Image (tube, rainbow, N blue to C red):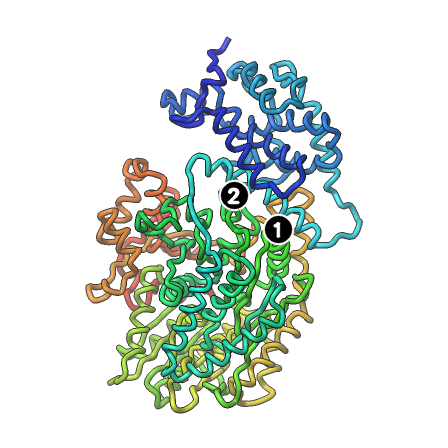
Amino acid sequence: MSRLVIFDQCIARPGSLLRDHLIQVRHSVEMFLRNESDTLRRLAGLAGICHDLAKSHTEWQDYIHLKKKKGPNHSACGAFFFSYLGYHLLQGIGEWEQYKSEWLWLIRDIADHHSRLHNLSNEAWLKCNDWPSLDLAGIEAFIREQYKELSAVRINEASLEQWPKEAEEAVEEALDALQLGYGSWKSLHLMRKVQMWRHITTGLIAGDRFDVKQVTTIWFDKYAHQRHLELIDNYCKQNQNHSLSAVRLQAQEDIMTQLLRSPTERFYTLQMPTGYGKTITSLKIASWFGEHQDYQKIVYVAPYLSILEQTSLVIEEVMGEEALEHHSLALLEDRDANDQRTNGSQLAVESWAHAIVCTSFHQFGKALFPKRSQDVLRRAFLQNAVIIIDEPQILSPDVWNVFLCGLEALSDLKNLKVIFLSATMPPFHYGLSKLPVPLQVSATSDHDRYQLLLEEAQDEVSLASFLKEKEVTTQAAILNTIEDAYRVYRNIKTEQAYLLHGLMIPIHKKVLIETIKRELKQKKRQYPLYVISTQVIEAGVDVSFQHVARALPILPSIVQAAGRVNRHLEGVALGTVSIFPFYREGITDTRSLIYPKPLQRITDQLLQQQSAWRESELTELVQTYYREMFRYNTFEAAMAYIRDAYEGQWQKLSNFHPFEQNMLTLPVFVPWNPKEEEQKLLPKSYSYLRNKFKVHNAEAIYERYSDKEYMRKLSFEDRKQFMILFNYYVLNIPQKKALRLVGEEQFLKHHIPILQGTDAYDSQVGLRSLFELTDGFI
């Protein structure tokens, strides 16, 4: 007979008895689901009791007492225990028919509570375990103590060995209940069901994680929101000497007047021209909801890190609040010990345990459709939040309707307010059951900042000449592919030119953008400034040029690019946006490598109605574009994923990605080091990490990464922070190109290989060795 550890003596972690942990998780789950039915709360509470029961296994106890390096998997066994006990609980109280789906959901949640979230059909948990290594008598006594309804249920080796045969039938019955057959179904109804599933998952995972490590936070009350409103108003008034300030103040006043006509809806669109102060206006709206409707939290969501970091600084400057940033390069810096708003742990970051959060589309997508159990934590503190979604048109059209449907279901569940911000707002009527309340200010002819001119076709040589002939001092050219941008840059041939694109490592790109911003602030310029870029500069980079030349894309991109021209009405004359077809070497139309043909046709038909357009004329043009776009394709095919998820194929939804992914990529570490004069442009968080880990160049960072012993000794949180630093140097390169550049052998040897040799990556142009081969890669 195996050596047993008495159940009541088992520990969950040093200093904590297993039984105490299970009871605490039960209470946490039931509290989290306090607004649900008594039966659901009781069933979910039982899941909390069962989820770590298998940690009482002798070998797992040896592991936690440091007698073994690894313990047996406890999640599958915990799911097995719950399937047995949960079934008998529901049968005993006569609720099996009504709650068999929730029973199956919770089985899956326990099996996955330290891993990826799998489909319901995955039955790897349904197997007999090493019962002689568990104190079944002690477990039975513990369960009876917690659940009187289960006092007649035996927990012994014979009953557990018999259970898989009965369980298979119960699982099949639960799965059958979820099958819709050929009947009609409504996407929002099913989405509400699957969002409730993940609400239950959140209760279980949060109960488990927060019992292990406490996360403390407080939310904004109405008085904090009142203070924020005063600070926002003061900030706007202090900037009245700005050229565009009167226009912005009037626009903000008009928006707030519109809001007061419909203050109780869930969804709003805030549509303002670029540079009119959308972000600050949205923060004012969110604070107004907080003061008058008891909303406690603001979550700002954007597509690009540049927008996120910029908005985080605006929040600190305008509202006097530090936002918690959650994205791939985010570091929660140490706070003052007296500041109780945040907890510096990684758990606090992942659970968004803060009153203001700035996060990415990618991270927010994981809140809607979590891929791993840890992802659901960001839903734990989402109740009564105002969600601000910036530049939603950048989301892939293929997932747009699914995203909206998921957001509507979650907003009902969590009492959310949602505000969409954009100058080019996509349509909502295929994804939401009710259209958002429009809050809109259009540009007027009195305050036009630019005119848009349609020009003759260009190639890399003629475009360089076209830019040089312009009698202005600041210009940008935005091309559709990296190779196009590189070719134009190469033909400019001047020291006052910068190249910006997606094949630059994050830290290089940050330094370059800061350099460009500083150059643009110079009042007196001896030589003209040229910035040659891909779409990187179109959204979220607060820069303003006198002239922007844009290779013909689709209409929303044109409007976004135009937002970089005379942005703050700083010029006496109108700025100019030149739009032209671009043919690489005068032959290849690279536009078609990036944009679908039907959207090109819609754009061309609309633009060709006139040879010139003023800013105030573009609002209606964009609305027409989106009407035509969705008339051509409603993008409703992906809505079938909602049905798949409801029927148990969760991974159809959890593979949600906010951007189109046309090719596989591989990560490569690029050892680029900033010059001495660029050191002062480095982000504070980057410098903090470099000092913390005592590495002062890229090669030293990679050396530490390659030292397995060094990485193993780092704590979990330190390892996460080190990888943030490491990822400042990582490029994701198309697979074939990466293998050609680094070699297959290096990828087999290192998970992320280092790029050897200095000629492949250049301080001016980035990864230049692939420009002739990138085939349209952005």
How packed is label 2: few (under 14 Cα within 10 Å), some, or many (20 or more)? some
> For the view shown, which residue lies furthest in the front direction?
223
- Numbered mark located on residue 413 in the image: 1
Secondary structure of residue under mark 2: loop
User: Is residue 770 at least partly visible in the picture?
Assistant: no
- Numbered mark located on residue 372 in the image: 2
Q: Residue at x 32, y 52 (%)?
A: 333
Query: If you read the primary sequence from the N terminus, does the residue marked by circle 2 or circle 1 appear first?
Result: 2
Quarter of the image for residue 532 reads bottom left
Q: Decide if residue 217 is on the left or right side of residue 373.
A: left
Determine whether 129 is above or below 26 in the image.
Answer: above
> For the view shown, which residue lies furthest in the left direction?
676
Q: Which kind of residue does numbered mark 1 sit on?
A: Leu
Judge by depth and name the residue closer to the eye, 766 or 636.
636
How packed is label 1: few (under 14 Cα within 10 Å), some, or many (20 or more)? some
- Numbered mark located on residue 56 in the image: none
Secondary structure of residue under mark 1: helix
Determine whether 699 is above or below 277 in the image.
Answer: above
Determine whether 225 is above or below 625 in the image.
Answer: above
**The C terminus appears in which quarter of the rendering?**
bottom left
Q: Residue at x 54, y 73 (%)?
A: 256
Determine whether 306 is above or below 626 in the image.
Answer: above
Q: Which kind of residue does numbered mark 2 sit on?
A: Arg
Q: Provide residue 543's location: percent of width, then percent of height.
A: 38, 75
Q: Provide residue 330's location: percent of width, then percent of height.
A: 38, 54
Q: Residue at x 51, y 64 (%)?
A: 286
Q: Provide residue 449's location: percent of width, then percent of height.
A: 45, 85
Report the Cα–Cα distance between label 2 and label 1: 20 Å
Judge by depth and name the residue closer to the eye, 157 or 226.
226
> For the view shown, which residue lies furthest in the right direction?
183
Q: Residue at x 40, y 65 (%)?
A: 319
